[in-house]
Image: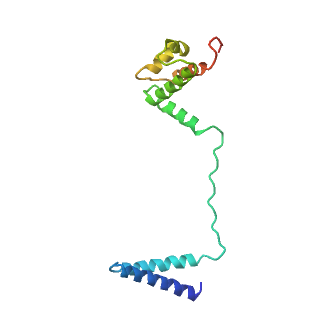
Amino acid sequence: MSRRVVVQAMLLGLAAGAVAWVFGVQGPRPILIGACVTAGTLAVLSIPPGWYGSWPHRPRPRSGGGSGQVWRLANRLRRFQNDHDPALQRRLRTLAVARLRRLGLEWDDPRAAERLGPDVHAALSAPAMRPSLHDVDVVVSAIERLDQPEGAGP
């Protein structure tokens, strides 16, 4: 770094301190501001021309496939097993209502309870659902069966 560059950086720092003092900064603060501007200018000017920093390495993609949604669902089921989970019950019921509406049935229609199964319909209608993993599997299977024609087998 040349002497000329150092002198220019010091003059820039002096000017910054003077401007701060003119605008009412009191005490040793204008000197501190000037020193910081000088140090910052020298740090920037000490970088050799044509030098470019390297980009940080990208994180490795997760292996094994799947999606985050599957992980979140499994984690939620593991955490709330046999405990009241209103979010899970609301999501399953919303899914069942949507599938029933595609068939032209409303939730309160007796045919909806027949198509889902009385136990599944009662579980999704209950004020509190405390499902085990088997119960969730039964409910999801019943909802999936709604897409099959009424007389079709499993």
Q: How is the image coloured?
A: rainbow
Question: In which quadrant will I find the N terminus?
Answer: bottom right
| Residue in the foreground of this view, choosing between 14 and 77 | 14
List the single residue furthest toward the front. Answer: 104
Q: Residue at x 63, y 77 (%)?
A: 48
Question: Residue 68: which quarter of the image?
Answer: top right
From what the image shows, is residue 46 above or below residue 124? below
Q: Give the number of callouts.
A: 0
Residue 133 point in image, percent of width and height:
53, 24
Question: In which quadrant will I find the C terminus?
Answer: top right
From what the image shows, is residue 56 above or below residue 91? below
Can residue 124 be seen from the camera position used here? yes
Residue 127 point in image, percent of width and height:
40, 22
Question: Residue 116: which quarter of the image?
Answer: top right
Residue 92 point in image, percent of width and height:
51, 26
Q: Residue at x 48, y 86 (%)?
A: 11
Residue 13 point in image, percent of width and height:
46, 82
Can residue 137 be seen from the camera position used here? no
Q: Would you say 53 lies left or right of 17 here?
A: right
